[in-house]
Image (cartoon, rainbow, N blue to C red):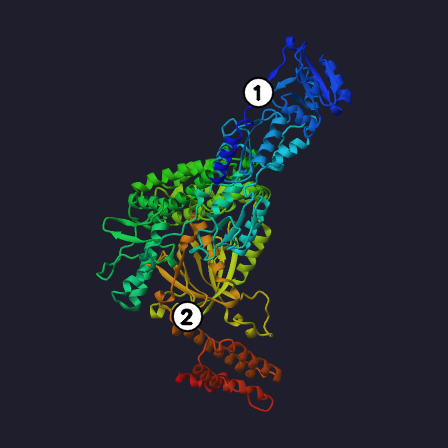
Amino acid sequence: MAYSMADMSIASASVAWITTAQETYMEDAMALDAQVCLVGETSERDDLKEALKKMKMPHVTSKTGKEYLKDPNCETVHVVDDFESYEFKDLWVNGARILGPPIVLRKAQEDAFLPCSSRPLYCQQMAGNVVCFTGFTRKEQLKRLGELVHHMGGSIRKDMTPNVTHLVANTTSGQKYRYAVSLGKRIVKQDWVCAVWAKRSEEGHHGSDEDLMMQFKVAPFFKLILSFHGFSEEERKHMEEQTTSQGGSHAAVGDRSCTHLVLDETTVEELPADDSCPWKVKQEWFWASIQIDACADEYLYRFELPKTPIMLQMTPTRQHSKYGGGRKRQLKDSLAALSQTADLQETPLPPRKRRSSAKDTPGVMSQSCSSILDATQTPDGPRVSATSTPNEAGQASVQKAAAKPTSKRHMTAMELLQTETNYVRILETIISVFKEPLEQEQTGGPILAPEDLKTIFSKIPDICAIHQRLKVDLEALLQNFSEDKSIGAIIVKHAPDMKEAYPPFVNYFEMAKQTVQRCDRELPRFHAFLKIGQSKPECGRQGLTELLIRPVQRLPSMILLLSDLFKRTEESHPDYTQLASALESVKGVADHINEDKRKTDSHTQMFDIINDIEGVPPDLLSAHRTFVRRVEVVEIADSHMGRGDNFAEKGTSVSMLLFSDTLEVCKKRSKYATAAHKSPHLPRANQKTHKHIEMLSLSHIRRVLDINETGTCHNAFGLLCKPLIDSSSELDRLYMFALTQDSGNKSEWLKSLCHHIATTACKTDVDNFLCTIDPEELEITKTNYEQGTFNKAVRAAKKATKKVGRTFSNKSTRQSVNRAASSASTVFSPAVTSDNITPQQLEKINKRLGGTLSMRTMSPMRRQPLAPRQIKSQTLQPSKKL
């Protein structure tokens, strides 16, 4: 605002010269009484004389031209080449009409009259340009720029009006700047005026040339110094590079020269203590400025710290705990809260009933469980969050409209409707957040070329329209569901449209993806547009490329749901034949699409994985399924003690193989548990190293629990899963694990898992599947956590001892004995550390291995080998005392 007030005062003081230059032309009658005076060096230019001769204009020559100033017989126009010379200033002060040589030559070429201007006119390089100034505090500088504009045929306005064509700005703030941005006017630096004046004598040159506009435009961060807070190191460096490329500079947080502090509103909880920056803005301001190619209004993106009520700092279990109930009550309440809030977000099914208790009071999950919202049970309706979003409110309305599932077939049909609703919402998000804004008129001009828009979005509107109609039909059917209604007929009805719309999109998806990546890399405004779209809640922090892949993944998901529905439909059911036709129709579309899309390397990797697992279900191998990641974990839940469920025994090491829609759980076979256990005498060809435990669909996982780190609980996480389909129990299953040290970062693993769970469920809110929780709320204690490791170590020692016995019984050489005994100590040693086992336990375990380790000194050539039973009794006898 300070710049605008200065502009007004300067403009008021200079009102004498800041007026519109009005031009008239000499009439035929006037030409007889007019003459041209060539002053100074112009008197020696033959081209000017030829031009005047062509125009039939009489001319005279003079050194100064002063003698023709007050000639009463005719009107004299002076032609001066140097507008900085003394002669020019003397003539101007005395009211002479002055023209430059370029204007004379141009009018002669156009066969037009010479202009009769009240101001000196050197050329017409700025003819038609209406200029306004802002951000200049020096009156002399502003006056000089105004004179140059007038000398080149331009006009000047005091105020920023729609008639203004160019704003010469020395700042990116003030009302004039904002108005010019909103009107899409050209905003240039003062160097633009000087550059046009430097080329004043060149023919065919104009001040509005596109090259000049691009060269001297005011960049979004012109004369701004930005600091960034709350971003990762990689993101901060990227934003600093963008700042430099957009005309600004960057400084460290707390630097007094900083003009703007850009903060990540999703991570920043408090402002830096030493910051004195005048503007504190959200990161959206940064990307919006690049997108519109101008500095966005800071008032629209001001950063404010969130105000969180104190009551939100308590978890439901902590609120329940003050009423008593013990550990088991704590675990029960935690699981109930997790299951009920998960029901609200993932399925239109009403929440499961549970017994009421006087000790139960409505609670609010803590911020550490940010994905779980406050839910209050009402007698006549589903749970509704006090802070629910429009999406959740829509799901609540679906819950109220849908009837309680009467069968497994009905339940699967409702799951089909829910995933279809989520999928349609994603398609509508692609259109409303990305496609339509790119097609509309943008501040600063189009962001993408029309051909790129067509390549990226191609059939998205057609696919969206098909699934909108499909969703409406499914909603109508499930509104008053009965077992005799046909779901397959609805799918068959829309299958031809899907077959027409999907192949063009999927077949050119790679081209669309490459186009997005190329434009993101080459076009800063498009890059900023993607960043803004990704930050919107409806996108769930997913980029355009991640959303565009959903149509590619939708048909395989529909096939799985229709297959489940078909399995749960009796052959005598009227819908059995229609479902078979629907399944074949969708499979036909998918087969047609996937025929040219199968990647050899992906299939090779899938075959290697399947060939390495014994008893793996054959349907794990699928054309649409891809392998994502593998981790090694140890089970820390204990189903025998009522603390969760187990895939295997507590303390067992299992492998988790994450696929795009499935989680395969398996464990190493006993003889491949460690490299030391592998016998060199056994053939290794065609040996499967793992044994299948369970193939868990990602759609059956309600929540991923990120268990907080404590002094005794490390790298722990949990999975809250829906009940088994064939189980009579309606309780959710809770599995808890601890990542091994070589499995990588826990946070990355959980994010990847949640991302694919959301993809399978056709949801964008990935973060809602991840919940942070304390180990005490799941009854994980130091004793239980270490006991599993201790028992595992003892079992490994037992196996190693048996191996030593087999070595002696087979009359091996001294080297074989040493190798077997060494394997025993190698297998056991990782568990026997000060980090995992107490000194008392370590002393007892050393007694166990005393007999085994002393066998290194025994020679099988001098002593009768002991039988395995004898070895077991000698080496493991002390275990009864533990």
Task: For label 2, count other residues whose C-alpha is less than 10 Å away and answer few (under 14), some (14-19) or many (20+).
Answer: many
Q: Quadrant of residue 64?
A: top right
Q: Is residue 315 left or right of residue 563?
A: left
- Amino acid on which the number 2 mark rests in the picture: Lys
As helix, strand or loop, the secondary structure at mark 1 comes to: loop
Q: Please state the horizontal and vertical placement of residue 674, each as a whole percent of the image.
A: 54, 72
Tag 1 near tag 2, CB within 8 Å: no
State which quarter of the image contains the C terminus: bottom left
Counting residues from the start of the chain, the first of labels 1 and 2 encountered is 1
The residue labelled by disc 1 is 22
Taking 252 as reference, is 154 above or below it? Answer: above
As helix, strand or loop, the secondary structure at mark 2 comes to: loop
Q: Please state the horizontal and vertical placement of residue 193, each as a whole percent of the image.
A: 62, 33
- Number of labels in the image equals 2
Of 451 and 278, which appears nearest the observer?
Answer: 278
Q: Residue at x 41, y 70 (%)?
A: 650
Residue 506, can we see it? no
Give the foreground label among 1 and 2: 1
The residue labelled by disc 2 is 650
Taking 502 as reference, is 706 above or below it? Answer: below
